[in-house]
Structures are given as structure tokens and as C-alpha cells.
Image (spheres, helix red, strand yellow):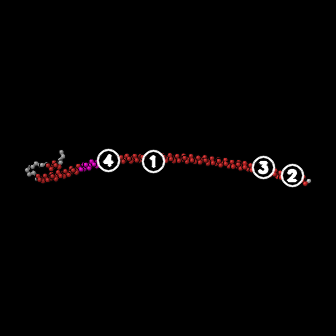
Amino acid sequence: MRLTPLDIQNHRFSSRFRGIDPTEVEGFLHLLSEDYEALLKERDALEHRVRDLEHRVEDLSRNEKVLQQTLVTAQTLSEDLKRTSLKEAEVVVGEAEVKAEKVLAASHRRASRLTEEIRELKAVRTRVGAALRQTLESHLQLVDSLTAIDEADQEHDKVAYIAQAEIVEG
């Protein structure tokens, strides 16, 4: 059974012949009960503090677990994001390479077509030049023949004029 400070204060010792001084005993018991009461209050306060600290430790432990889980989740998400970003970058680069190859192939095809068109245009220019030369030469021949006819007509006109003049004079 535990003693309370009140038990200590109210305790009475039996008297004997030549026993101890009752006033001194009562004073001592009074001091002892006050110290005992102070110790009990301190113990109660410490028990309350221990309970509060235990609750705080539990809360901190739960928070630590949550933080650890959050950290693991954040690391996992970070790694997933890195992998996803790398895959997306590879896809973008691959698409860019495919587009570049298509553009390059289209450019080569266009250059080939333009080279072929240039060759065809040069051939047409050569044919047009030859046809124009031939047309000019035939026109020159025509002009030459017309000039010859005019000269012949003029010669004929001279001869006719002279003949007419002789007839008139004659």
C-alpha cells in the first residue's frame, strides 16, 4: 500500500516510556510529507511529460514514415519522369531524323527533276535554234529568189523599154 503525504502527516506513533520526542517526530514527519508530496507532484508531472513526449515521438515516427514513403515515391516518380523524358526525346529525335530524311529525299528528287527539266529545256533550245536557223535560211533563200526575180523583171523591163523606144524612134 502506498503512503500519501496526508498519511504521513496524520500518522501517530505509539508512546513508550522514554521514547522519542513527539514534537521532533511530528516536525520530521511534516517535512517528510511535504517532500514526499513534492516528489509525487514532480513524478506526476514527469509522467505527464513522458506521455506527451511518447505521443510526440509516435507522431514524429508516423511523420517520418510518411516522409520516407513520400521520398521513395518522389524518387520513383523522378526516375519515371527521367525515363519517360528520355523515351520522348528519343521519339522526337527519331521523328526529326525521319522528317529530315524525307526532306532530303524530296530535295534530291526535286533536284533530279530540275536537272532533267534543265536538260530537256536545253534540248528544246537547241531544236528551236536549229528550227529558227532553218526558217531564217529558207526566208533568206526566199528573199534571194525574190531579189533575183526583181532583178530579172528590171532587166526585162529595161529590155522592153529599149525595144519600145526603138519602135517609137523607128
Among numbered discs 2 and 3, the one appearing first in the sequence:
3
The 10 Å Cα crowd at callout 4, few under 14, some 14 to 19, many 20 or more, is few
Q: Is the magenta stretch mostly helix, strand or loop?
A: helix
Which amino acid, by three-letter code, is at mark 1? Lys
Q: Given the image, on which type of amino acid does mark 2 rest?
A: Ala
Mark 3 or mark 1: whose residue is earlier in sequence: 1
Q: Residue at x 85, y 51 (%)?
A: 156
100 on left or right of 49 = right
| Residue sitting farthest toward the bottom | 169
Give the residue pinned by disc 1: 82
Label ID, residue 142 = 3
Q: Which of 76 and 14 is in front in this view?
A: 76
- Return the x and y of residue 49 as percentages of the image width and height: 26, 50
Distance, label 4 to label 1, CA atoms, is 34 Å
Q: Sequence order check: which comes first, mark 2 or mark 1? A: 1
**Amino acid on which disc 4 is placed:** Asp
Determine crowd level at label 2: few under 14, some 14-19, many 20+ residues with C-alpha closer than 10 A.
Answer: few
Marks 2/1: CA distance? 112 Å
Residue under numbered circle 2: 160
**SS for callout 3:** helix
